[in-house]
């Protein structure tokens, strides 16, 4: 049986250029913002950014993405993917959702991981 803490530990600390990510067999594994902050901070040991600096950068990045989507912009990270907010009609009225289109590098990496 899987330790409940493993659910929130999908990363293995690597160097700043590449994180080592555990092969995820369980779709219930959740990657949290806290885990991302911790992993980035650990990968930058000896660098000039501490945990609070990394937290600030990640929070500012997420705030900027959120504001851009709310204002109707499309957000694109080359190779990873792009997001846009769309209005949808449903039986209860109008709603919104965020659409994500997978980028070429992510798509290729996914194909390699799932087929290999």
Image (spheres, rainbow, N blue to C red):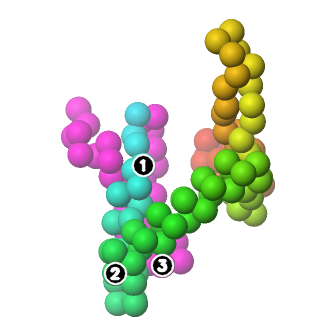
Among the two numbered marks 2 and 1 on one chain, the one whose residue lies closer to the N terminus = 1
Question: Residue 88 falls in which quadrant of the image?
Answer: top right
Question: Taking 34 as reference, is 53 above or below it?
Answer: below
Q: Name the disc covering residue 50, or none.
A: 2
Whichever of labels 2 and 3 marks the residue nearer the N terminus, that label is: 3
Between the residue at mark 2 and the residue at mark 1, the CA separation in whole angstroms equals 20 Å
Q: Position of residue 4 (x, y in %)?
A: 23, 39
The local secondary structure at tag 3 comes to loop
Residue occupying image coordinates x 44% and y 78%: 15
Q: Residue 47, can we see it?
A: yes
- Residue 65 in the image: above or below residue 114: below
Q: Residue at x 67, y 39 (%)?
A: 98
Inter-mark Cα distance, 2 to 3: 13 Å
Q: Residue at x 75, y 36 (%)?
A: 86
Q: Position of residue 63 (x, y in %)?
A: 55, 59
The secondary structure type at the circle numbered 2 is: loop
Label 3 Cα crowd, 10 Å radius (few <14 / some 14-19 / many 20+): some
Q: Position of residue 43 (x, y in %)?
A: 39, 76
- The residue singled out by tag 1 in the image is 31
Question: Residue 112, can we see it?
Answer: no
Of circles 2 and 1, the one toward us is: 2
Main SS type for the magenta part? Answer: loop
Image vertical order of residue 113 relative to residue 36, above or below: above
The label nearer to you, 2 versus 3, is 2
Q: Name the residue that disc number 3 marks.
A: 16
Q: Secondary structure at mark 1?
A: loop
In depth, the one of 63 and 48 nearer the eye is 63
Question: For residue 48, what is the image quadrant?
Answer: bottom left
Of the residues under marks 1 and 3, which one precedes in the sequence? 3
């Amino acid at each position: 049986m899987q330790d409940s803490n493993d659910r929130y530990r999908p990363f293995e600390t690597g160097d700043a250029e590449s994180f080592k990510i555990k092969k995820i067999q369980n779709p219930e594994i959740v990657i949290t913002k806290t885990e991302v902050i911790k992993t980035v901070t650990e990968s930058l040991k000896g660098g000039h950014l501490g945990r609070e600096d990394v937290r600030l950068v990640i929070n500012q990045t997420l705030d900027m993405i959120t504001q851009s989507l709310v204002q109707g912009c499309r957000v694109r990270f080359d190779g990873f993917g792009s997001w846009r907010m769309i209005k949808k009609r449903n039986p209860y009225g109008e709603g919104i959702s965020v659409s994500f289109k997978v980028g070429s590098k992510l798509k290729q990496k996914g194909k390699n991981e799932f087929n290999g």
